Image: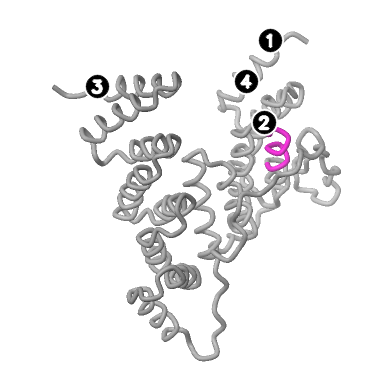
Amino acid sequence: MALDKEKILELAQRYVLKGHSKKAIGEYIRLIEADPKDKRLYLKLGDLYHKNGEHEKAITQYLTLAGLFADEDLNSRAISIYKKILSINSKRIDALHNIAELYLKEGLRGDAKHYYQSILEITPDDQDARKALNDLDTRQKPGEKPKPSLSHMDLSLPNYPHSREIRPSDDKSDLFPSSVVEPHGLSVDMEILPPAPAPDKESEMHYHLGIAYKEMELFDYAISEFEIAASDPPIKFDCYIMLGSCFLEKGDNAQAIQQFQEAARMKGLTKEKLTRVHFNLGLAYEAGGMFSEAIQTFNFVLSLDHSFSEAREKVERLQELPK
């Protein structure tokens, strides 16, 4: 008889909410036995073991999950899981080897080199790591400066300051005659710009790591990755959107507003991007209790796209709130 997967997931979640983690673990094990390719199950099970202090059992689940991601060439997601493992046990040689190999696969030699060096610091006689390092040094062109490794950057969880006061920018309509001026002083530049260049490999990797951490609800890790990736102009807009979403998930509505406003001020945004960022900005205003600002922003979304039913529903609902 086939398992009713959704019912078992609901049961497991109820066990978690009631603090019956061992019973929840049993349900997740049942589900994995029935569907060993469902990645979310390994993540949930690993998190439960980790929360219970059963770190080796947690690592076993995370290793399986990372392997499934790597098998599908979802390398950034696999890397994010291996980093999660290393945050539990920084001396896991298997995780260090796997993450180094994935960085090599992505063409990020500096990062791969960092992890091979870490392996040799733990086990100086590791011949595979030594051979990989020698190969990397041999492949470096004479006179070529090694590319800085992302892994040497400070990727520790940032200590975010208290939310800053939100101050809209001055109206720039006189500077950009083709712009549309959005409520609250934001200037929306509709200038058509040439196609942006492709993002560089390292920034793209940081962006995808941010996505992976966000999906795992590790928002501080995700924010750190998106902030690094945002230095690359081709993906700056998407990074601001992801940063705003992360802060919104964390309940830091003021910071979410700040990020969405930064995205809205960027030059050359398409109508689709303008609609997207202002809808998100409206959500942030609503979450922060700034209902008047939210209504104006959702109305602006409707001025860009009359068919945006979610924005219309938001306006109607907010207008019904007591003044």
The residue pinned by badge 3 equals 4
Q: Who's the residue at 53% across and 53% down the image? A: 207
Q: Earlier in the sequence, mark 1 or mark 4?
A: 4
Crowding around mark 3 (Cα neighbors within 10 Å: few <14, some 14 to 19, many 20+) is few
Q: Residue furthest bottom?
A: 142
Give the foreground label among 3 and 4. Answer: 3
Give the foreground label among 3 and 2. Answer: 3
From the top left corner, tell me how far across and down residue 161 is, in percent. 75, 43
From the top left corner, tell me how far across and down residue 163 is, in percent. 76, 38
Q: Quadrant of residue 61?
A: top left
Q: Depth check: give the residue in front, 213 or 29.
A: 29
Amino acid at the residue labelled 1: Glu
The residues colored magenta run: 252-259
From the top left corner, tell me how far across and down residue 283 is, in percent. 64, 29
Q: Quadrant of residue 305?
A: top right
Crowding around mark 4 (Cα neighbors within 10 Å: few <14, some 14 to 19, many 20+) is some
Q: Depth check: give the residue in front, 8 or 310.
A: 8
**Image disc number at residue 320:** 1
Q: CA distance from mark 2 to mark 1?
A: 19 Å
